[in-house]
Amino acid sequence: MKKKIVAVLLASIVCALPAAEIVQAYGNTGYVKSAGMSEDDWAGDGWDEDPDTDYELDPDPDIIEANTLIPEDLRVTPAKKTVFKGQKFDIRVVAAGGSEFDDLTEEEWYDIYERSVESVVFRSTKSNVAYVNRNGRVTARKRGSAVIKTTINLSSGDSVTFKTKVYVKKI
């Protein structure tokens, strides 16, 4: 899946460039130079200092939208947890199993997550049993059970709420 996303991004970038901005590989050094650069401008060690030659490509907006999370792509972990009084654990937002984002590296997931998620709100039904801070860190306070509700607000305007059942035991 990762290769497919990268291939689509690269293909869309190359197709969107005017002919004068197409870059060519320079030998097997891994560096590239602009098609309009002369050999005098090219030192063989990367781009020259001319700001007109150095540019960044923006990915196609259609590709970005295609790689944006929807509620069905998300879940939280853990869904339930048994802990002893005083223990702490984190609730994390992850890709749902079987979604197209499930096999991404941590860096790829973070990029898509940052682009797609507007905010995450954690709430405990019983803060005296299981307290949760704004970062999803849960602290077991006393024996009992509580539900941590995690609401994920997406930049698309959609939102989804997940529940984590927490059971706190006495030591």
Image (cartoon, rainbow, N blue to C red):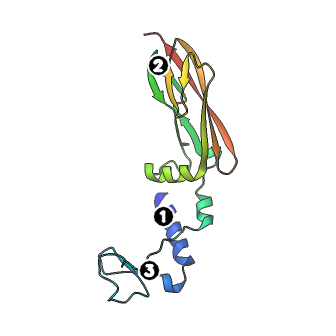
The amino acid type, in three-letter code, at marker 3 is Thr
In this figure, which residue is indicated by the disc labeled 3? Answer: 53
* Residue 51: image location, x then y, percent: 44, 77
Q: Nearer the viewer, residue 43 or 167?
A: 43
Q: How crowded is mark 1: few (under 14 residues within 10 Å), some or many (20 or more)?
A: few
Q: Report x, y in % for residue 58.
A: 54, 68
Q: Nearer the viewer, residue 49 or 139?
A: 49
Give the residue displayed 37% in from the left and 77% down from the top: 49
- Badge 1 element: helix
Going from N to C along the chain, the mark reached first, 3 or 2, is 3
Evaluate if marks 3 and 2 touch, with contact meaning CB atoms under 8 Å apart.
no
Q: What element carries label 2?
A: strand
Which mark, residue 6? 1
- What is the total number of numbered labels drawn onto the structure image? 3
How many angstroms separate mark 1 from mark 2 (CA)? Answer: 41 Å
What residue is at 58 percent from the left and 57 percent from the top? Answer: 67
Residue 85: percent from left, percent from top: 46, 15
**Residue 96 to residue 126: above or below:** below
Q: What residue sits right under mark 2 in the picture?
A: 83
Are discs 1 and 2 less than 8 Å apart at CB? Answer: no
Mark 2 residue type: Val
Q: In the image shown, does 75 or 50 lie closer to the viewer?
A: 50
Please state, as top left, top right, bottom left or bottom right, where the C terminus lies in the image. top left
For marks 1 and 2, the one nearer the N-term is: 1
Residue 102 at x, y = what percent? 51, 47
The amino acid on which the numbered mark 1 sits, given as a three-letter code, is Val
Q: Which of marks 1 and 2 is in front?
A: 2
- Please report whichever mark, 3 or 1, sits nearer to the chain's N-terminal start: 1
